[in-house]
Image (tube, helix red, strand yellow):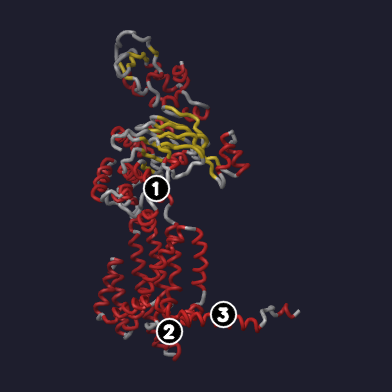
Amino acid sequence: MADHAFGGIRIRNLYKIFGSNPGAYVEAVRNGLTKTELNVKYGHVLGLRDINIDMPSGSIQVIMGLSGSGKSTLIRHINRLIDPTAGEVLVDGTDVVKMSETELRTFRRQETAMVFQKFALLPHRTVLDNTVFGLELQGVGRAQRIDTAMRWLERVGLKGFEQKYPNQLSGGMQQRVGLARALANDAPVLLMDEAYSALDPLIRTDMQTVLLDLQKEIRKTIVFITHDLDEALRLGDQIAILRDGEVIQQGTSQDIVLRPADDYVANFVKEVNRGRVVHVEAVMTPLAPGNGAPHGPTIAAGVTIEEAVRLLASAPEGDITVVDATGKPLGRVTFRQLAGAMVNAQETGHRAVA
Amino acid sequence: MDWFYTFPHMNDDMLRDLKKTIDEGFRGFTRSYGDVIESLFTPLQHFLISAERFMLKTPWPIITLLILAIAYAATRSLRIVAGCLVTLLLIGYFDMWEDTMRTVSMIFVCTVLSIVIGLPIGILMARSNRMQRIVNPILDVMQTMPSFVYLIPVVMLLGIGKVPGLIAVVIYAIPPMIRLTDLGIRLVDKDVLEAADAFGADNRQKLFKVQLPLALPTIMAGINQTIMMALAMVVIASMIGVQGLGQPVLKAIANQYFTLGIFNGMAIVGIAIMFDRVSQAYGKRLQKHREIAHG
């Protein structure tokens, strides 16, 4: 396993219909039967329709949607807590759907770990005993599993709380236990089902930071479910937006904010703090290639507008050069452009398309 | 119009023949298989006899200390231990020690048997709805059928003595054990079970690491109920030859000895309260982790 690079997750043509005889309606749904028709005429509920998502290894894939959009159903297909009606779920090249019960159990023990919205800790076990749970199921020796668990508890900031019971901890700390329990498994896939939705806003931001910091070293393939667009934009290397069981847009945070696929997404994006999401290259005036060396202050591509403003505000009058990773100038951006982009959705939209 | 006023019942002769046939059939069954069935129950009888012998042969101060030690280990409450001590001393002082020890040993064996049989049945019931549909009506019958009715075939098969008494008591006392095991496992938080699934637990691991520990407080309530119901059966069991506190009560009823009845009745109440408080306090201690909430 060690010398094999994890191949990521690919979901192919995934359908899920809930009801007494779901198999009978897949064809009809494929041919365009709508969710409402299916429900009214046949009494079945369409959970997911034709989901296709590629989640590259080592990145954070966010799946965003409101309640009832099917996001929690979708994440449960990856470790097959829910069986699909049709389609494939390829994790590291193996179709999870075709696994036998024993294979599935081994897969869940070795390849995936999950964090839950309601924490789902064992109330009769201490923090430490909760953290070793996954390793215990795998049959790892006692000394080794305690060693691993202690390391992760320390890493998520719970040193000194090992002997407490979950009920004695706040929500944020309980979810740290949930995170430590999942990380102790050292599985390549980390599934996070609305992991932070039950936490209050300050703690949530805090936990997002914890996850981003951790990801820099662990480089797992993380699937993160949320209904909060700000959270999605902050965490996601890739974001898929789900509505009524269908993916309506996939892309990076820039794609979602700058080029919403339809009014539904646009409506979401409207409320977003653009300064913290949009990168400077989306608003700059591009330079013709080979247009000499940069003069004045420079800023790296990929920096957000807000940071650029902070930099410009303390710099002398004038504009600023955007450079790429090698120091090559890409374009110039003015204070006016940046300020405009922060308050005016149209401005950045146009320029990005142009 | 005669049929309107008296229920048109089966022909008298036919009914008599029917009862006779069933009776004879059962008698024949008893004659040919009675010994075999009795030998099946010998291990149980040995268990009963050795439990009783232990309680009676061990000097009373040692038994008292033993009971107090168990009470303390289970409850960690000096108040309950003091209560137990006073009860035991009073029972001994009024010369009911031997009968009490017989009853306690009987209750102990009945409870152990109820747990050993009831727990697996309860687990199976929680696992399958069909099993629950089959077992539930049987439990209803066991709880409502007057004990004397099922004592008849038991006495016919095994005669009068300890083992038939034990069977009668267990039939009466086991339903809460089964029902509360089933309920406790079914009430386990679905989210926690899903987490166990997600981490790849097999059925055995789910049962022993998640379901049983989380159902334990409910199961303890079942054991408590079983003990109480077993004690309630002591007097009835004494009618078929079970020794202990029930027999003096029976004698008191027959001869109208008021004081004898009251004393032995109070002794039964005394050990009932002892068992109840100790097992309840133990059940509560098991869920201590639920009570210390974050705040």
Q: Which residue is mark 3?
A: B22
Say which residue label 2 marks: B160
Q: Position of residue A4 (x, y in %)?
A: 31, 34
Residue name at image x 31 percent, y 70 percent: B80
Residue B189: percent from the left, percent from the top?
42, 53
Respond whether the residues carrying marks 2 and 1 are from the same subunit.
no
Q: Residues within 10 Å of mark 3 (few under 14, many from 20)?
A: few
Three-letter residue code for mark 3: Ile
> From the viewer's perspective, is B79 left or right of B122?
left
Query: Disc 3 sits on a residue from what chain?
Result: B
User: Pointer 2 and pointer 3: residues touching (CB < 8 Å)?
Assistant: no
Q: Answer few, some or many: residues within 10 Å of disc 1's Cα (few below 14, many 20 plus, some between 14 and 19).
A: few
Give the labeled residue for mark 1: A102
In the visual, does A252 lie left or right of A329? right
In the image: residue A344, left or right of residue B270: right
Residue A130 can be seen in this image: no
Instruction: Describe the element under mark 1 as helix, strand or loop.
Output: helix
Q: Are marks 3 and 1 in contact (CB under 8 Å)?
A: no
Q: Nearer the viewer, residue B295 or B121?
A: B121
Q: Quadrant of the N terminus of chain B?
A: bottom right
Q: Nearer the viewer, mark 2 or mark 3?
A: 3
